[in-house]
Amino acid sequence: MEFKSLKNSIPKELYEILEKEVTELRPAQEKSVKVGLLQGKNLLVCTPTASGKTLIAELAALKSILDGKGKAVYIVPLKALAYEKYRDFKRKYDKVAKTALSIGDIDSSDPYLSDYDLIVTTSEKLDSLIRHNAPWMANIKTVVIDEVHLLNDAERGPTLEILITILKQLLKNSQIIGLSATIGNAEELAEWLDADLVVDDWRPVKLHKGIYYDGEIEFY
């Protein structure tokens, strides 16, 4: 699917930014559009690394923001990843949306975030913001959960599961986008999220498997 086919489906400002970088949608992106990404459907996207999952999230988040429907929150597991996403989003969308990074003091409700459109945070920080009754939470329209497979992680999983459960109750009309490179129970998780499942094995570089022994690799 050519990117220009989305010209009438996304805000003009968003299209003009993305057309400089994207000419053709990757398989998972096309599948996501076809199952309702731009109509606010919940999605669980399970595809290999570098297959284009982040753009799927960006399309949903920025469309919501630019259409005036509400804020978007992008949840990541690590502070380092939060910095990376924040820098990328700010560089890309600074002219059309106010992007904030919230990963600091877990004893603060960060009231300044009420003035921002796209908020990058960690699950622990967002959990804290909810417990501090941050008033701007009610304005969230899009929730992106990166590395959602960490629900199975012994350390971070419980916090993430509770967080998603609370968000589903607080933000009943919000769109949830779960992103994962690997997950064992995709169908079950999609059902729990009340989401359409998007699965694809396309990757930009072919993956070769082999065995390394005694200085040599034998591929199979």
Image: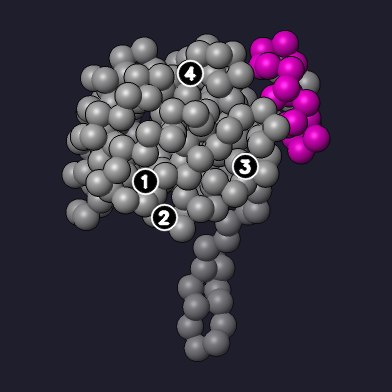
Nearer to me, 36 or 116: 116
Label whose residue precedes the other's in the sequence (1 or 4): 4
Please identify the quadrant where the N terminus is shown. top right
Magenta-drawn stretch, dominant element (helix, strand or loop): loop
Q: Residue at x 49, y 29 (%)?
A: 115
Tag 4: amino acid: Gly
Q: Which amino acid does the dot numbered 2 rest on?
A: Lys
Q: Earlier in the sequence, mark 2 or mark 4?
A: 4
- In the image, which disc is placed on residue 70? 4
Element under disc 3: helix
Which region shows up in magenta? 7-24
Say whether marks 1 and 2 touch (CB < 8 Å): yes
From the top left corner, tell me how far across and down residue 142 is, in percent. Answer: 45, 24
For residue 78, say whether it is visible: yes
Is residue 97 positioned above or below 90 on the image? above
Which residue is more in the foreground, 132 or 163? 132
Residue at 75 percent across and 31 percent down: it is: 17
